[in-house]
Amino acid sequence: MATAPAIADLADRPPRHSGILPDERTPLAGLSRAELAAALAGLGVPERARRMRTAQLWHWTYVRGVRSFEAMTNIGKELRAALAARFTLDRPQVIAEEISTDGTRKWLLRLDARSDAERAPAVECVFIPEEDRGTLCVSSQVGCTLSCTFCHTGTQPLVRNLTASEIVAQMLVARDALADWPASGEAAPGQRRITNVVLMGMGEPLYNFDNVARAIDIIADGEGLSLSKRRITLSTSGVVPMIERCGREIGCALAVSLHATRDEIRDRLVPLNRKYPIAELMDACRRYPGLSNARRITFEYVMLKGVNDEPAHARELVRLVAGIPAKINLIPFNPWPGAPYECSDWDRIEQFAEIVNRAGYASPVRTPRGRDIMAACGQLKSASERIRAGLRGRVPPAPAQAGGGSSGGQIRGLGSGGS
């Protein structure tokens, strides 16, 4: 059932800040502890009190999830007013929510425009409830320029990178919607609804490294949102130079969108492969810091009929990952309008999984979730538009992909992720 207008019908809805400069206040969510302390110093808070005030702000923002400085009752009225004048606790605007028959929920979020010349962009995130966990799939960019041919998001150009605040805000919006703030009394202690986060939504996370790293640090902070990095999974389409840095500086679980065992096939499915071919990608995976049987890499493999689903491909996949502590997620292709592929037959998927499983690798077949609301793997796409040419210089650039194309990311599979 749909609880709001269908997302496809919202493309022409006026943006939140249409023709108006965005709120000049800084979002409080997304600031590091050091930045909060510096902000408090700028407001005249004595040095001896800054650590305590920083902890209070952190608690109100990430443990209680308050949306007003007035709710911060252990902070003086004068300081609350000063904070409200410079900072905001507003969430992105939820312009559509859809709920699948299987319980999957998808939100279309309108972000603030960065100037009066920018159309306020939109981004999607998805919550996937399962019996033993609840997985939130968040986006790291608006749009995509990697043009992976099996992904709906690949048909949408890159608009811009998300800030750390905008990445964290997706989790705050989901916690609001799910009443998942235990400290506020909304949810029972020990019964957290969001147990895992996967950066598998719109965008290539490693092409927005700094903002993604900052956001993950905030999500994993033990005195706030408190989600272990073992339960946070970053999925990449194969940005080889950034993989080692990801393991060393972020330290979360890694998923790799592989989808093919031969360069000639992967070149077509994942154009980034022309710059970073399979051999280089697998070498980078073998060098991933902290790789062990307790910290395996997940290889994602979408099953495309007549393209990459032969038994020979399964045997090649086993040889390819040999020596890498790994799990292989087989993803039935989820259709979208105009898609050039079909999903492999179920018998073929089971045959493929059996070959991989017999070689000693866990090869679960991901159950499609949210297909009826276009929330399944590879189906996300917002109605955002490319930034006008005059604004492109103001957007943090991402590394260029092979073949002279512009840079960006792809939508990847939604799944359990984490441990």
Image: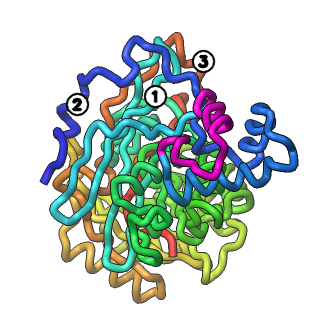
Q: Earlier in the sequence, mark 3 or mark 1?
A: 1
| Nearest-to-viewer mark from 2 and 3 | 2
What's the coloring here? Answer: rainbow
* Picture disc at residue 112: 1
The answer to whether residue 411 is visible is: yes
Specify the principal SS of the magenta part: helix
Q: CA–CA distance between discs 2 and 3?
A: 28 Å
Residue name at image x 36 percent, y 44 percent: 124
**Residue marked by disc 3:** 393
Contact flag, marks 2 and 3 (Cβ < 8 Å) = no
- Nearest the camera: 160 or 64? 64
| Nearest-to-viewer mark from 1 and 2 | 1
In percent of width and height, residue 4 lies at 18, 43
Q: Amino acid at mark 2?
A: Leu
Residue name at image x 50 percent, y 70 percent: 418
Q: Earlier in the sequence, mark 1 or mark 2?
A: 2
Quarter of the image with the N terminus is bottom left
Q: Amino acid at mark 3?
A: Gly
| Nearest-to-viewer mark from 3 and 1 | 1
Span shown in magenta: 67-86
Q: Earlier in the sequence, mark 2 or mark 3?
A: 2
Q: CA–CA distance between discs 1 and 2?
A: 16 Å
Q: Is residue 85 magenta?
A: yes
In percent of width and height, residue 75 lies at 65, 47
Callout 2: helix, strand or loop? helix
